Amino acid sequence: EADIYQTPRYLVIGTGKKITLECSQTMGHDKMYWYQQDPGMELHLIHYSYGVNSTEKGDLSSESTVSRIRTEHFPLTLESARPSHTSQYLCASSEGIGGHTEAFFGQGTRLTVV
Amino acid sequence: DQQVKQNSPSLSVQEGRISILNCDYTNSMFDYFLWYKKYPAEGPTFLISISSIKDKNEDGRFTVFLNKSAKHLSLHIVPSQPGDSAVYFCAASSSGSARQLTFGSGTQLTVLP
């Protein structure tokens, strides 16, 4: 069973609020990812990190930002939430560079901006 | 442009029968393919994978077949069980993209008792 945790599981918040979605893993994985998924759609990569102090934007443009100060922690922040940010946010991690390896996912955060 | 396509948004199968989920890809650089299963309000869980050097990989009730010339893979579940009802995502990666996963849009499998 994967040891990757996301909090909160569900969040309903008003427009303009600042939010941080937490993601932690205890597997010592170097790579971490944030995906965004809407119902019936594919998972879109919005941010990734290959290690401490490394962050990159993914394929899908996002107004969110991420940080990677510790290996195990990869929080995502929205400075000013909007209804268009309503979605499911999934955090994942995988082992280091090279080789075939699967990504392990957290349980996700369902964000609703009203 | 979607590089990984799952053209069937849904599939219903009777319990005990075979479920076949299909996936097509367009990027010839993909060399590793994975299937994930996702329940509502939860994150995807890894099911099975296959490298491009193989054409079949089996794990219990789950078998993945890869046809590189057709850029097609399929997941077979035999026998199907009601607990298999979930959304199944196909994903692919390549060494050129540093092993980032590209996902399809998923197929909702419903196994009827």
Image (cartoon, coloured by chain):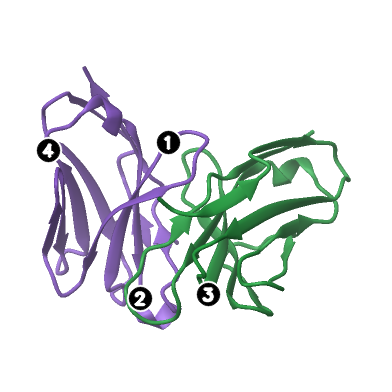
Residue sitting at x 63%, y 56%: A23
Q: CA distance from mark 3 to mark 1?
A: 26 Å
Farthest residue in the top direction? Answer: B113
Rendered position, A37 above or below A50: above
| Label 2 or label 1, whichever comes before in sequence order | 1
- Please, what is the three-letter code of the amino acid marked with disc 3? Asp
The residue lying toward the viewer, choosing from B101 and A27, is A27
Question: Could you say whether the residue bearing mark 2 is in a helix, strand or loop?
Answer: loop
Front of the two marks 2 and 1 = 1
Location of the N terminus of chain B by quadrant is bottom left
Front position among marks 2 and 4: 4
Q: Position of residue B74 (x, y in %)?
A: 19, 51
Q: Colour of chain A?
A: green
Residue, disc 3: A30
* Rendered position, B35 above or below B9: below
Q: Which residue is mark 4?
A: B78
Task: Find residue B54 and report its horizontal and vertical position in percent.
Answer: 13, 70
Q: Given contact means CB atoms under 8 Å apart, are the residues at marks 2 and 3 in contact?
A: no
Nearer-N-terminus badge (2/4): 4
When asked about the image quadrant of residue B83, the answer is top left
Chain bearing tag 1 is: B
Which residue is found at the position 16% from the left and 62% from the top? B66
Task: State how far apart marks 2 and 3 are (Cα).
Answer: 18 Å
Q: Which chain is disc 3 placed on?
A: A
Residue named by callout 1: B39
